[in-house]
Every structure is written in C-alpha cells, then in structure tokens.
Image: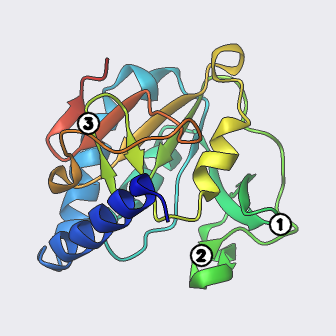
Amino acid sequence: MSTMDTEKQALRQAMKQTLRALPSTAAGCVGEAVAEHLSSSREWQHANCVALFSTLAGEIETAPVVRLAQRDGKRLYFPRMIPGFSLEFLHVSDMGSMVNGRYRVLEPVRESESKALTSDGLILVPGMAFDRKGGRLGRGAGYYDRALAGFDRDADRIQLVGVCFSVQLIDAVPMTSADVLMDRVLTQDGFCVTD
C-alpha cells in the first residue's frame, strides 16, 4: 500500500468516527439546509436535471433535495452500479421504484430510462471528506471518480457539487490524478469557495 493510500485510509477511518458521533437527527437537518442553499444557487437555477445519491449512514439526507427538484420540475437521476466498478445515472420518475443494489444501496431498476444527463445538469456527490479547493475523498472503491471522469463538463455544462456535513470539510484532501475535483462544495453552512 502506498503512502497516499495509507493516508487516505487513515482519513476515512477518522472521518467515520467523527460521523458516528453526530446526533441521529443531523442527516435530516443538514439535508433541509442543503436544499435551502441549493434552491437559490446559480447551479440550481441553471440545472435542467439533477443527479442525487441514495443516502447511506454518514451522509446527508437527500429527500429534501428530491422534494425541491420535484417542486421545481427538474429531472431526477440516481446512480446504478455497473460492471467495471463505475456508475451510470438513470432517470427516476417514481422514487418507490428504487431497489436494493450492491452494498444494499437503493438504485434505479435496470429497466429505468437510461437517457444521459442533459446539458446544464447538476450532480450532487457524496464523500467522506472535502476541502475548499474541490478535493474529495470517497469511500475507496473509485465508483464516482470513474463515472465523473467520463463527463465532458465544459461541453455539457455539468456542475459537480460535493455535499457533506460541515465536519467533513478539512484543510486538504490527499488527491491523485485519478481523483475528480468538485466545482463547489456545499454544507449546511452554505457553499464553500473553491479555487
């Protein structure tokens, strides 16, 4: 294991302990605050479609953002794991149609509409830690990094926003060339400026 891998693993373990110490109501409260900040953001105003994630332990609750997207007429997409340790984003019109996938993560059924995210899309990305320059530490398998690297963000005007609890915002995330930078990072306190 390289020094970088060791550093990332240690940060993941430390962040897991920090997240376990949060009150059980934190995920929902932070999800509401994130939805409120998003609703008036330029990213939200320009987005025709929004890709979210199914909430796992240690992540903000995304249901408030789902309700906001439905209210504002945004097309909703959720990731589904595919061979090659990557993700595809599928359109979901009925939240009740989601099923347990690998690792018991709710995802769209295989038969879901698989239209690509349209231009002016917004992808909300979970992570274990983020920094103010857009650095992101994932869970370690690289699913999001491989999927996000496949987008032509400039041509398609796709915005990547990391979403997390404020305690997950650190000075610097250890990054390699395979790690995808976020355009902005959002916590319950608002958007963090990225360089």
Distance Cα–Cα, label 1 vs label 3? 35 Å
User: Mark 1 and mark 2: span between their CA atoms?
Assistant: 17 Å
Secondary structure type for disc 1: loop
Residue mark closest to the camera, 1 vs 3: 1
The residue at which mark 3 appears reads as: 37
Q: Looking at the rendering, in which quadrant would you find the C terminus?
A: top left
Tell me: 188 left or right of 6: left
Q: Residues within 10 Å of mark 1 (few under 14, many from 20)?
A: few
Horizontal side, residue 167 vs residue 16: left or right: left
Residue 83: which numbered mark, if any?
1
Residue position for label 2 = 106
Asked which quadrant contains residue 138, the reply is bottom left
Separation of residues labelled 2 and 3 (CA atoms): 25 Å
Return the x and y of residue 141 as percentages of the image width and height.
Answer: 58, 65
Q: Nearer the viewer, mark 1 or mark 2?
A: 1
**Residue type at mark 2?**
Leu
- Give the amino acid type for the residue marked by disc 1 in the picture: Pro
User: Which residue is nearer to you in this view: 163 or 62?
Assistant: 163
- Evaluate if marks 1 and 2 touch, with contact meaning CB atoms under 8 Å apart: no
Residue sitting at x 41%, y 52%: 4
Residue 126 versus residue 39 in the image, above or below: below
**Mark positioned earlier in the residue sequence (2 or 3):** 3
